[in-house]
Amino acid sequence: MQPMPKTLKILNGVTAVLLLVALCLVFLYAPREAIMGDVQRVFYFHVSAGWVGGLAFLVTAVAGVIYLIRRQSRWDLLAVASVEIGIVFTFINIASGSIWARPAWNTWWTWDPRLVTATIMELLYVAYLMLRQGIDDPDRRARFGSVYGLAAFLSVPITFLSIRFFRTIHPVVIGSNDPSAQGAFDMTPRMLQAFLFSLLTFTFVYVTLVWHRVRLGRLAEQVEQRKMEMLTA
Amino acid sequence: MAERAGAVLRAGSPSALSGYLKAVGAVIWKDLTSELRSRELLGSMLVFALLVILIFNFALELDIRTRQSVTSGVLWVTFAFAGTLGLNRSMAVERERGCLDGLLLAPVDRSALFFGKALGNLLFMLIVAAIILPVYSLLYNANLFLPALAGVIVLGSIGYATVGTLFSAMAVQARTRDILLPILLFPVVLPLLIAAVRATDSILLAIPLAEIRGWFNLLIVYDLLFIAVAIMTFDFVVEE
């Protein structure tokens, strides 16, 4: 078994430190929001988790396309690693949003475009994993995964658009805001700093996790190979 | 039949397009002939569709007031469920006794096979819709014979059959084939169904067409996008 690469070890440390600093920024440095109070602090990690979810699924789609062109199993490993992480972070995104929505909107859930799109996205990639589970041949599994990953990713913006024709109450903190949105707020410089730092931190968390997961996938492949060698010997 | 398609393409070099179209036609013809002889697919799709409407009738208590607001939803859920049934069967038939391998051996472009299967599936969906609509009109005394509604149904079915054919080709090759297709298909066709349901709703409420153009545009964009995706990826799905 190969030892963990040195860069990965360093990345582990950096990510841990970043996460600690981000927590401090969110809870200590960023000011208390005037109307919503401390609940607003969920925003920093809520958006960051959503960002990682979207990024992860984009990586899956791109890695899938590269796999279909190059046919190297590492791209498929990257695709599936990214999906697994994306599912977890999208769930964090939905759950933390729900916790915030209870005091801000007075309900855990509403059929808003963003909420529904995030949930559909989650279901799409659970379906992706189920598709892979049902196929034994690794080459076919990788091909189907790539095709579905691409189709799924392309459908997400259309889903969002189609639900958006209904009115939305979700606040848009970055960019223009719909006057009908509830729970919106303007970011002070300190809030913005904490927010951008959270985004950076979560991106690091994502990269670190993907790396570990791809490495795990490689090791599993090697174990499989050894097993075959033992059986044929 | 696949041999015929191949022979057609080899002979028809002066016009590659007509050869391609003949290959597509051959696949559709094959599906239609086998359906005419077995009458498995359409029969089960139709009975299933009627059962779904029946269940809705009692589940939703389709009295006059509820009917107005849920007709479009009931129709599209019926089409979607019956469509899944047909898609699954149409591809499972190809898997049995290696029919798909025979088709793949034909020296024609793989996308011609895809279009053949997708158009066949589209045709079956439209036939089901063409029978369900008058039955629904009759049962609930509603006028569903509107040209705009036919347009929505055609556009919606095109997208549904495209994505459905692509995914069912994957699903039949998996261990969990029978349960996999709806799980793969529904989250991806959700925007299509939303647009189709909203457009149908607006048409039934006699809202002027200019106001529901957005939904039509969404349907067209969805159809074009996924036809392109299917052409690009179908090769990878059937490759052995």
Image (cartoon, grey):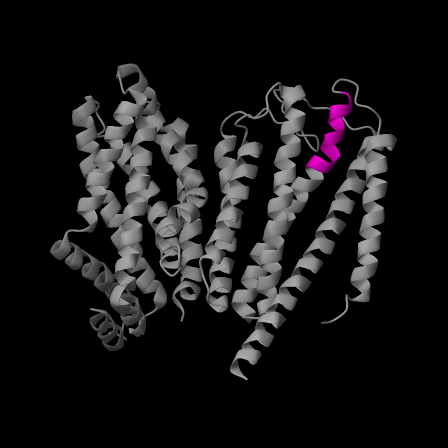
Q: Is residue A177 visible?
A: no
In the rendered image, the quadrant that contains the N terminus of chain B is bottom left
Residue appearing at x 82%, y 65% in the figure: A6
Residue B184: x %, y % from top left: 43, 49
Magenta stretch, residue numbers: A37-46
Nearest the eye: A219 or A153: A219
Residue B74: x %, y % from top left: 31, 30
Residue A60: x %, y % from top left: 58, 55
Nearest the eye: A92 or B73: A92
Residue appearing at x 63%, y 34% in the figure: A95
Task: Identify whether A117 is placed above or below B163.
Answer: above
In the rendered image, the quadrant that contains the C terminus of chain B is bottom left
Nearest the eye: B60 or B199: B60
Task: Identify whether A229 is placed above or below B184.
Answer: below
- What is the tally of numbered marks visible in this picture? 0
Q: Is residue B164 visible?
A: yes
Asked whether, in this view, residue A176 is left or right of residue B228, the answer is right
Q: Most extreme residue toward the right, as rendered? A: A29
Asked whether, in this view, residue A157 is left or right of residue A208, the answer is left
Secondary structure mostly seen in the magenta stretch:
helix
Using the rendered view, name the quadrant where residue B95 is placed: bottom left
Residue appearing at x 53%, y 24% in the figure: A167
Q: Most extreme residue toward the left, as rendered? A: B37
Task: Identify whether A136 is placed above or below B12.
Answer: above
Residue B187 covered by magenta stretch: no
Asked whether, in this view, residue A104 is left or right of residue B175, the answer is right
Residue B71: x %, y % from top left: 30, 26
Residue A40 covered by magenta stretch: yes
